[in-house]
Image (cartoon, rainbow, N blue to C red):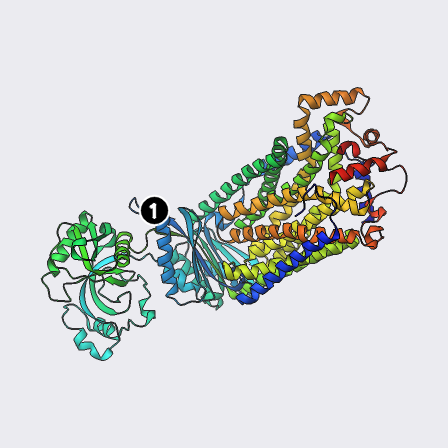
Amino acid sequence: MSTPNKTVKSPARSGRSLVILAVILLGLIVTTFIQGASSVRLGLDLRGGTSVTLQPRASNDANKITTEAVDQAVTIIRQRVNSLGVAESEVTAQGSGTNRQIVISVPGDSGRRVVDLVGQTAELRFRQVLAESAGVSNPADTATAATPAAGVSPEINARFAALDCTNSANRQGTGADAPTDTIVSCSREGGAKYILAPAEVLGQQVSAATAGFNPQQGVSWFVSLTFNGDGTKAFGALTNRVTTLASPLNQVAIVLDGLVVSAPRINEAIPSGNAQITGSFSQVEAQDLANVLKYGALPLAFDRGEVQQVSPTLGADQLHAGLLAGFLGLGLVVIYSLLYYRGLGLVTVGSLAVAGGLVYLLFLVLGKSIGFTLTLAGIAGAIVAIGVTADSFIVFFERIRDEAREGRSLRSAVESGWIKARHTILVADAVSLIAAVLLYFFAVGGVRGFAFTLGLTTLVDLFVVFFFTKPIVTILAGVDFFASGHRLSGLSPKSIGIKPTTNQVTTSTLEA
Amino acid sequence: MSKLTGLGGRLYTGETSFDFIGKRRRWYSISAIFILLSIGALAIQGLHLGIEFKGGSSYTVNKSGISVEQARTSVAGAGIPGEIIVQKIGNDKVRIQTGALTSEQSKAVEASLTQTFNVTLESIDTQLVGPSWGKEITKKALYGLFAFLLVIMLFLAMAFEPKMAISAIVAVIHDVFITVGIYALVGFDVTPATVIGFLTILGYSLYDTVVVFDKVRENTKSVAAVGKVTYSQAANLAVNQTIVRSANTSLIALLPVGSILFVGAGLLGAGTLKDLSLALFIGLAVGTYSSIFIAPPFLASLREKEPAMQALAKRVASRGGAVAETVTAASARPVFAPSANRGPRNQPKRKGRK
């Protein structure tokens, strides 16, 4: 980039800027080819889909909103959404620190189910196991499945026999289990299936859970948990009753989201409210189980902040409208520049074309690399940026005219005009950038899309002014058509407003 | 066009000059009236907040030939509390807005709509906003606004001078008040898109002000040393010199915004594009006004209070120059008198600067 104390830049230097620009453009094009990015990723409001914004809420002192809690909630919700098998659905946390929202976006028509799914905050429950078998479907085998349990209806038995836990559709963790029902359920991994008695202890009755390590028994991880007053009583009664029964009735299943996380055997009655779950846990498994016990289904409670469903028809309409508005705006700016700046207007048109190309390529590359999606607000940001970009050229051109009015030759007017215009452009673009950055950090959803595009296009604007517009104008200043002030060049004495008399005025007193 | 460009030249030299700084009381009064009107409108009517801010549900049914009455009857049948607003958007859309609903109530409304109009659930565009979410959004928007003003003020104070920063912020606050006032008065919906537009406008308004102040700074750099014109006169010349540029940048900015507004309001009827561009459109107009009529005069008022500038004004007055308050084209001209040796004088200076 140029510095104020350099002498007039030679066309060679301008040429170098243009080469740099060409290399970058080429680089971006090659990148898109390598990435295989052929189209801009569109946001849900442009192609139809559902987005849900969840606002974390601390329901009691035990579950404060922490960064880890939000991260964990994102992971759990992502699992739930992925289990629906909708391509390109996304679960992200937006905002910073503890003040974050979770945004779930699901494209296409299937969004409805997601809204219903994430709307339910499933509970953690402890249920006695009534029957257990391998997770495969075996409808003929109703007899063995039904073995012991009193109070298990034939209907439940049939469902249990037919249940195929190897099919992921049956492991969707709906959380739809009513605590008072006897239910059939799969293990989370799908390796086993269970008939479970009504819940006797609920997740909110667990007051603490930690993963621990016992060095005396070799590599052995365990989970210890503590119940509150009600929980101690209920868990004591449950364990007291089942511990003497035969397997599998002496097992208590920990059910999360309608799926069995673990079904440990009860070795003895536990009236103290302090229990330990041992087994061949790895460290990660023990910690996961502890988290599940501690947090229940989700580490936080959520308010459904906003649900937005856009039909594909409306999406297409909005895309068309956005593009139409863009072309219309661009067209008007081009016409105006040509009318007002004549030959120089062509530079504006060229610069806008370069800026447009850069922005489009960046959209492609960023779509692949950081998952940038273009929303309607983003399109609006880009269109608004057309104005900002064109403004930079006007500031520059008017400065050139100012300098020419002081009697400078075109070539020197371009250079001294640029030095003054550059400061204005830098400050003004910095203001735009500050606005974009602040908007990005303070806002959620669509506003962020707008801020991102605005910021991106402002940077592109700066780049184009420095590496395209300025060098091109410098080169053109050496071309006779402009240098001689041709009527159509936009730099004729008439359009600048210089009167060809000796009574020229100067503001040199103000400039010294 | 050529008339306008010719004017640009005359404004630059001071041959034609509008008195922006001297007549500041007039501009202040006009703005004061508008701001009072805005405050009045805000107090009496308040802002018409969209459901994103106050919480609520919105359902848009896409089907040609459906009527507002049908929709109203259908939703009323679902038995939900509160006020129901039904609007026709374009030719084949009806939008129903209700207060905040529970999941069950929302399902009832959707069921009722799908049945009445025989459309699939997926073809209804819905937006459900919880009441606490609206508060959150409002809070964030306000935080954003204050953070923006603060950061910009600091930035401008560094890039220019503190008094310019203050003047620029005064102009921005002026813009905020009047734009909000217009929204209150006319009763346009305020949605998050409006707020985006609004914050962008602050940036735009500052862009314009920055362009003007840049020239003001250049013109007034050595005003005290030269002693031929007062600060106000030099600033006024700067405003005149930049007015063509301001008009151009505003017009160029207005063209794309206008086309978003046209397409958004005309083709889509309602939504993000319309809300955004309407706020931009109104704000741009107000912002351009303030960058010419409010920010520079305010800056001049601040600077003229400085002892050095008052001394300068006295010196200029005693020389028989114009009194600072009433600069006119005729009186300003002698200051920029033709200098016979312009060419030679300029040549070496330019080399030194490059």
Residue B1: percent from left, percent from top = 80, 49
Quadrant position of residue B238: top right
Above or below, comparing residue B200 to residue A126 in the picture: above
- SS for tag 1? loop
Horizontal relation, residue B155 to residue A297: left or right: right
Residue drawn at the location 71% of the way across and 52% of the way down: A13
Q: What amino acid is found at the position of numbered circle 1 in the picture?
A: Ala
Residue A331: percent from left, percent from top = 70, 58
Chain of residue at mark 1: A
Horizontal relation, residue B273 to residue B301: left or right: left
Residue A154: percent from left, percent from top = 20, 73
Residue drawn at the location 34% of the way across and 70% of the way down: A169
Q: Nearer the viewer, residue B137 or B203?
A: B203
Is residue B275 among the parts visible in the rendering? no
Is residue A300 among the parts visible in the rendering? yes
Give the residue pinned by disc 1: A58
Residue drawn at the location 22% of the way across and 52% of the way down: A212
